[in-house]
Amino acid sequence: FWTYPITTTSTSISAMSAYTTPPACPSATADHPFSVQNLPFGIFSTAGTSPRVGVALGDYIIDLSTLKDTLCAGVEGLQAIDVTSGSLNSLMGRERKVWKGLRAALTALATGATSGLTADNLVAQSDATMHLPADIGDYTDFYSSREHATNVGTMFRGPDNALQPNWLHLPVGYHGRASSVYLDGCDVVRPTGQLQKNKDNPKEGSVWGPCKLLDFELEMAFFCGGPPSAPGASISMADAEDRIFGLVVMNDWSARDVQKWEYVPLGPFCAKNFATAISPWVVTLDALEPFRCETSAKVQNDPTPLPYLQDPSYGSYDIDLEVTIKGTGMKAPEVVSKSNFKNLYWNVKQQLVHHSSTGCNMRPGDLLGSGTISGTPQDSFGSMLELCWKGTREVKLGSSGEVRKFLRDGDVVAMTGVCKKEGVGTVGFGKVENEVKPAGTQLREGGAKGVWKA
């Protein structure tokens, strides 16, 4: 047998003299979103087969079920169910040293350092159907971009009271609805709900009708990993990275007019529970290691967080994010926002640590969203609410001649994330793309777990 020590620290190909294109997968060039630096995990199936674990490499998927004996013999602590299951929960539940060992083994196979991959191990992505990567037990969404929180607070309370008094002291969040987390390709039905009857006088009550102010929110999210924590136990900052399996791009669909009427005093409810969508490939922290960077805030010293939230390596990851909209009459999608994951004041470690600080037990497969990620320039705002500044300005959709304030039926919203750095292979997240369907549209599951179509 060949073996890969679980203590390996080789998580980046940047130490190589030059990027090595995998011999069995020539499409996985340095500038391909799924380069050998990436190796993201997902769940896929092909015609007539069951969903199983795969790893994206170039235009292909490494079918880990075809390598289970080799991988389990070579990676200490890895079990067959981890690489053959119809969800990533089993693999997510292993310790990080197992994830590292598996990554090292796959890197060696992909680059030909060992026996290498063959055609029997590879499936063309064009022949595969992607599924939700995990059975999501719980879903929490944060509100961690200072730029976004400042924009929204300024709109509704004025610049002097933009941030609530607690915002700079803790990562604000709320518990979302795991059952309505869907995948790239899922249609989103315009929700119907209670709307404030008179926008200037809430005492007049509400009416029932379709949401008129449908919005996207540009976010990322991470899946928790490691063995489940015990009730009453908290996760320390020192251990936080070992409990984060990987990240996805996320669209937190929002009904702004429903939200306006319902959110006092407990925050969003029906305005957020109808749909959240994620990209299918889960990118690990080891893949992102070469892309560590400062946050847009750079430091947290006014105020300094309480000791349990202080991160000695405070920072984020340099992930370029983009949102496009394609209306029914448009020939091509147009970019409406370009942001970056570094535009977070509270990072992923702080979010996880705070979530567990009361003794909340965290389980593998739990999903934690970042909150809308906005930058300072207007074209980096991560929601239509900000881009149209609460309906006071129109948002031009490129050169199409179309404008928006909020989303229309038939609009296709797509989000992507990618990391690029000289000398390191590109790391892409794929996309999360959804089409808005009219209120009342009936959906059916479209042959993939997490994908419902009209």
Image: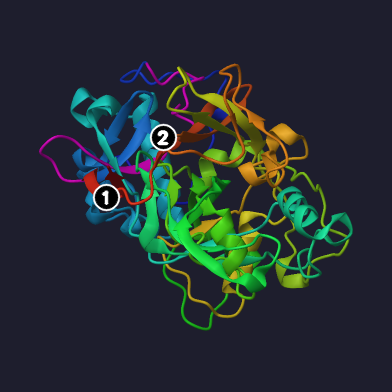
Whether residue 10 can be seen here: no
Q: Which is the main secondary structure of the residues drawn in magenta? A: loop
Q: In which quarter of the image is residue 380?
A: top right
Residue at x 40%, y 60% (from the top left corner):
365
Quadrant of the drawing holding the C terminus: top left
Amino acid residing under circle 1: Gln
Whether residue 323 can be seen here: yes
All told, the count of numbered labels is 2
Provide the residue designation for mark 2.
410
Residue at x 44%, y 28% (from the top left corner):
34
Mark 1 and mark 2 residues within 8 Å of each other at the beta carbon:
no
Q: Is 348 or 81 nearer to us in this picture?
A: 348
Residue 57 position within the rendered picture, expressed as x and y whole percent measured from the top left: 37, 29
Residue 7 position within the rendered picture, expressed as x and y whole percent measured from the top left: 48, 51
- Residue 267, relative to residue 278: is it above or below? below
Report crowding for label 1: few under 14, some 14 to 19, many 20 or more residues within 10 A (C-alpha). Answer: few
Q: Which residue lies furthest to the bottom in this view?
A: 232
Residue at x 56%, y 40% (from the top left corner):
288
Q: The magenta stretch spans which residues?
A: 27-51
Residue at x 61%, y 55% (from the top left corner):
348
Q: In which quarter of the image is residue 46?
A: top left
Amino acid residing under circle 2: Gly
Residue 233 position within the rendered picture, expressed as x and y whole percent measured from the top left: 54, 79
Residue 123 position within the rendered picture, expressed as x and y whole percent measured from the top left: 24, 29
Q: Is 313 or 385 nearer to us in this picture?
A: 385
Q: Residue 442 carries which label?
A: 1
The answer to whether residue 40 is magenta is: yes
What whole-number distance in Å separates the C-alpha atoms at marks 1 and 2? 15 Å
- Residue 426, relative to residue 130: is it above or below? above
Q: Is 81 or 109 nearer to us in this picture?
A: 81
Q: Secondary structure beneath disc 2? A: loop
